[in-house]
Image: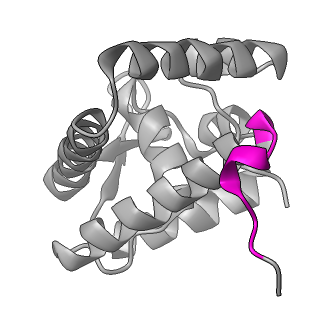
Amino acid sequence: MTEVDPLALDLPVLASLAGSAADEFLLARLRADGHEHIRRSHGYVFQRLIAGAPTVTELGAALGVTQQAASKAVIELEQLGYVERSADAADSRIRRIALTDRGREVVQLGRRLRAELEQTLLATVDPADAAAARRVLVALLAASGGLEAIAGRSVPLPSD
C-alpha cells in the first residue's frame, strides 16, 4: 500500500480530514471526562439551545430535520440529562427545550478542550502560518457557502 503525502492533498480534503480528526479527538476527551454517550450530532442541538429555548418543531426546522427526528434527539438528550422540557411562560401548552446544568457543563468542557487543542497546535506552528491557515479556512467556508450558517448558529446537521 502506498502512503499518502498529506501535503499533496487538496485543501478541501485536508480541511475535512482535519475537522474529522479533531472531532474524534475531542469526543474521546469528552467521553473520558464522564460524558461517555456524547455524539457529534449532539453538538448541533446544543448550539441551538445556547441561543434560546426552542420547541421541538422550531428545533427541527433549525436543524433541517423532521419534527420526529428532532423529537428523537431531544428524548435521547433528556435521558442523558443534557436537556429538559418546560412549559412556555406565555402558553403552558407549548413545551420549550433548554440545556440543563449537565448540558451547560458539557458545552463549557467542549469549549475548554477545543481551546487546549488550539493551544497545542499553536505551540507547534509559526503564528503567521496559523493566521494564514485561519484566513484560508474562512475563505474555504465562504467559497462553500458555510459562513452565514456559522454566523447565525444555524449549521445544519451533516447529510449522509
> Do we see residue 152 in this rendering?
no
56 and 25: which one is in front? 25
Residue 40 percent location from the top left of the image: 52, 60
Figure quadrant of the C terminus? bottom right
Residue 38 percent location from the top left of the image: 39, 70
- Left or right: 103, with 141 as reference point: left
Depicted 139 relative to depicted 3: above or below: above
Residue 157 percent location from the top left of the image: 69, 47
Residue 96 percent location from the top left of the image: 43, 40
Figure quadrant of residue 131: top left
Depicted 80 relative to depicted 46: above or below: below
75 and 158: which one is in front? 158
State yes or no: residue 120 in magenta: no
- Left or right: 150, with 29 as reference point: right
For the point 23% across and 54% down, the residue is 106
State yes or no: residue 6 in magenta: yes
What range is drawn magenta here?
3-12
Depicted 159 relative to depicted 141: above or below: below
For the point 71% across and 61% down, the residue is 69
> How did the renderer colour the structure?
one colour
How many discs mark residues in the rendered view?
0
For the point 70% across and 38% down, the residue is 156
Figure quadrant of residue 84: bottom left
Depicted 45 relative to depicted 62: above or below: below
> Do we see residue 23 in this rendering?
yes
For the point 40% across and 32% down, the residue is 53
Figure quadrant of the N terminus? bottom right
- Left or right: 78, with 76 as reference point: left
5 and 153: which one is in front? 5
